[in-house]
Amino acid sequence: MMRRLVLEPSGPGPAGAWVGDGGVHWRVFSDNASAVEVCLFDAEGREERLPLPGRDGSFFHGFLPGVGAGLRYGLRAHGPYDPARGHRFNPHKLLIDPLARHLDGPVIPHPALFGFDVARGWPQGEDDQPSGLDSAPFVPKAIVVDPAAPSPRPRLGGRLEPGRLVIYEAHVKGMTQQHPEVETVARGTFAGFAAPGVVDHLRRLGVTAVELLPVWAFADEPALWGSGRTNYWGYNPIAFAAPHPAYGPPDAFCRMVEALHDAGLAVVLDVVINHTAEGGARGPTLSWRGLDNLSWYRLVEGNLAAYVDHTACGNSVQTEHPGVLAQIVNALRAWVVERGVDGFRFDLAVTPARNQGAFDPEGPFLRALAADPVLSSCLLIAEPWDAGPAGHALGRFPAPWLEWNDQARDAVRRFWLRGGSAGAFATALAGSSPVFPAERGPLAGVTYVTCHDGFALADLVAYDTKHNLANGEDNRDGMDTNHSVNHGVEGPTGEPGILALREQQRRNLILSLVLAQGVPMLRAGDELGQTHHGNNNPYCHDSPLTWLDWAATDPTFLAFVRQALALRQPGRCAFLTGQPGPDGWADVAWRRPDGHPMAADDWDDRAFALRLGAARLILVNGRATACSFVLPDDAAWSVVLASAPVDLPALPPLSVAVLAPDLAGE
């Protein structure tokens, strides 16, 4: 296989594996292991185990001279297997380096992946006896990367200003798998996402940032093994610093970032640090559990064999632990410094922000990111909830964090689709001021109508209820409260009146998204008219159900979305400040259709006007009948964009229009 190798102690340096001094250094974090081995693999899969000879506090370390980038390795950790005390060491399990920069393939489902003996009924075996099966054939190997490889061009400073952000939430494979201008070999990969046809679509659409669903290496949950389904979305990580192998190697990721940057697009990663793919006590041992279960995970006080589960995914990462937090910060920094990423959206962000069980806006995790000179300058977006107690924290993250605004999402949906409150809708348009402290302003919220979770836009107006039987959970999964409506027929129909109303409602929702104060986020595929056929949780479908169908694009609706997003261009949008503008106009004024100021009782009506300074007038008619408006007499007004044909001063039922002074008529 190889010449007989012996590691030397290493000096100080970053965690993980890194090339320097004519060889490769390793530093591995574990408070509780008694020994850690680096396991080297040759091209035939033969293994050589090398104990890390040095230990400084919580770090085992070693140096191997005469080797470099391309070396394939894994880790094994020794220590007690004693779940009752929180320890699950098992040297029969090959472990992924948590800070590996590159993996050579996927996790292969097999009983050997479990740290406990599953012989008595896998995967429901007792966890008090360790497994003696070697997992190495089924675990991806880390690959040492070349630190001298060129990194992407500088990050897009100005593009990250909230007032310029228009976010596009996309999936690498879903975006590219059926794109006609992506070469077959590149479909489903970073290279495909960097293809000129994909980048040009984003540029012409008018977005300024791409938020990618998880691209960190991930694995399928054991519940999906053998089912024909897979974890397509990727919210199940197996390494924090390595790209998903199926999407491509690190250099392909960097080339994608550079292509997006060249087009003026910022790159934001949707990241999962709240839990890992190891799940609960009956989950596999892939990395963190085998290296130091007691440090990496929150365990139940008084029952250390059980896991605190704030995520509904089986475990919760213990970000309060200084050593764990340092590994996470280092991983995030790697994506920025080495790969040019501009920011992060944190899945279930309340979980890492918990301290002593409760959300803590001044806790270790949020403090660490604020103190880091690299990460503090990134765009940071929170999904401000989790599945734990008191898990909804919208409005409580510190500046300069942005937060997904689910209150605005629901208010917009209810107003147009379920006869909801005009007052709640108006609050959403104004940026949800009751939610965010005044010093943060309306741009603290990310406004969205749809995202990967829940109905696609086309399904929101075509289905009353979810249709998730294909997910294998008897339709129990996915949200039950969608505030959707089918407009007369559940699902597909050829009835022209229903189709026309659905189209108009999609336009209402898109215009509401764009006009609302806050940072707008568009879900990929909504601009094309993509449907998931009523499935509001298609996380487990890597198929045409979730891939964008470019051939079925609705060109008329796509053109409308482009026109709507153009309203967010600098100089064309007005943001509330609470102060009069330089021209003396109030930044916002609410009016009844008759032109008089809105009073408290008027919010029972579903028609109103919103004036933003001197240059923008928004007319909203949520009534079931047409409504005439008295327009301000200080200017002649013309329609910039509307969800339905407008004959001023009247608006048709269920419509919204954007007006501007008719300068040509002055």
Image (tube, rainbow, N blue to C red):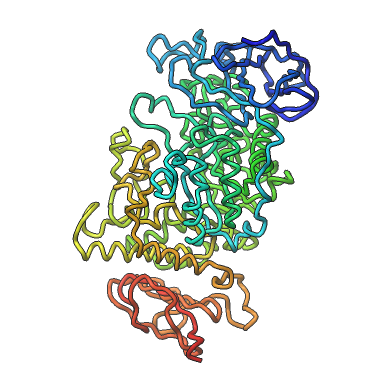
Q: Nearer the viewer, residue 104 or 222?
A: 104
Where residue 565 appears, x then y in whole percent? 48, 65
Tell me the quadrant of the picture where the N terminus can be found.
Answer: top right
Extreme residue in the bottom direction: 666
The residue at 67%/21% (across/down) is 30
- Give the answer, above or below, for where 404 lies relative to 657: above
Q: Nearer the viewer, residue 139 or 29?
A: 139
Please tell me in which quadrant of the rendered image residue 56 appears. Answer: top right
Q: Is residue 602 visible?
A: no
Q: Nearer the viewer, residue 254 or 214?
A: 254
The residue at 53%/51% (across/down) is 210
Numbered circles on residues, count? 0
Please tell me in which quadrant of the rendered image residue 572 appears. Answer: bottom right
Q: Nearer the viewer, residue 339 or 3?
A: 3
Where residue 450 appears, x then y in whole percent? 42, 53
Left or right: residue 251 compared with residue 545: right
Left or right: residue 414 compared with residue 65: left
The residue at 72%/23% (across/down) is 24
- Give the answer, above or below, for where 324 lies relative to 1: below
